Image (cartoon, helix red, strand yellow):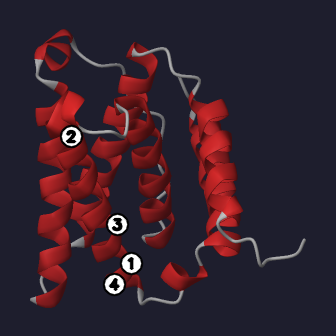
Amino acid sequence: MFSDADMLRLQQDQYRHDARNHTDILHLSKNDRLKHYGLHFAKYVGRLARGSAEPISYDRTIIDTVLVSLSAANTMHQHLEAPAPMTKEARQIDPLRTYADAAGRFADACEKIDHMEAFIPIAHKANADIMSWAIHQADERQIDLEGQLRQRRGELRGRQFYIAE
């Protein structure tokens, strides 16, 4: 599992990645960025709900979820902490339900932006729960999370062929 220091390093790595590869999103207002990330979470819940009918794998969706959660945390200046171990009861709940609940709460926070209602505490909690879900799923599935994050960032980096180093 990850320590608080590991989580900070992951956020810093994501910040560097986003600054190079996602300037289109970084030029959006913070509120619009949060809505963008909320749409990603909804898309990923849909991927998982489709099961074997979905061409993008469960594992890849976990990786994409972590990347977006890190970006959302950075946008909100949220210092993510290492997730607590899952309780026995939590392990018995359908994992898709857990993710869908947190993604729905994140969407609720995004919707509150337009109504000028308090949204940051809701978004922080939902994002922390999404990250916790993803890390626990990666652990259960024995995914090399850091290695897969590097690989996926490399794929995304390749889309920006016009950026010279």
Element at badge 1? helix
Specify the quadrant that holds the C terminus. Answer: bottom right
Q: Do we see residue 118 in this rendering? A: no
Asked if residue 159 lies left or right of residue 130, the reply is: right
Which is nearer the eye, 59 or 41?
A: 59
Q: Which mark is residue 62?
A: none
Q: Residue at x 12, y 55 (%)?
A: 104
**Whole-Å distance between the Cαs marked 1 and 3?**
6 Å
Answer above or below: position of 59 versus 21.
Answer: above
Which is nearer the eye, 48 or 82?
A: 48
Alpha-carbon neighbours of circle 2 within 10 Å: few (<14), some, or many (≥20)? many
Q: Where does the image place residue 68, in percent across and percent down from the top left?
A: 43, 57
**Whole-Å distance between the Cαs marked 2 and 3?**
14 Å
Q: Where does the image place residue 146, in percent across and percent down from the top left?
A: 63, 33
Q: Which numbered disc flags the more N-terminal residue, 4 or 2?
A: 4
Element at badge 2? helix
Instruction: Please state which amino acid type lies under the numbered disc 3.
Output: Tyr
Answer above or below: position of 47 versus 135.
Answer: below
Element at badge 3? helix
Find disc 4 in the rendering and name its residue.
32
Element at badge 4? helix
Q: Do we see residue 129 in this rendering? A: yes
Q: Quadrant of residue 135?
A: top left
Find disc 2 in the rendering and name its residue.
99
Instruction: Please state which amino acid type lies under the numbered disc 1.
Output: Arg
**Whole-Å distance between the Cαs marked 2 and 1?**
20 Å
Q: Which numbered disc flags the more N-terminal residue, 3 or 4?
A: 4
**Whole-Å distance between the Cαs marked 4 and 2?**
22 Å
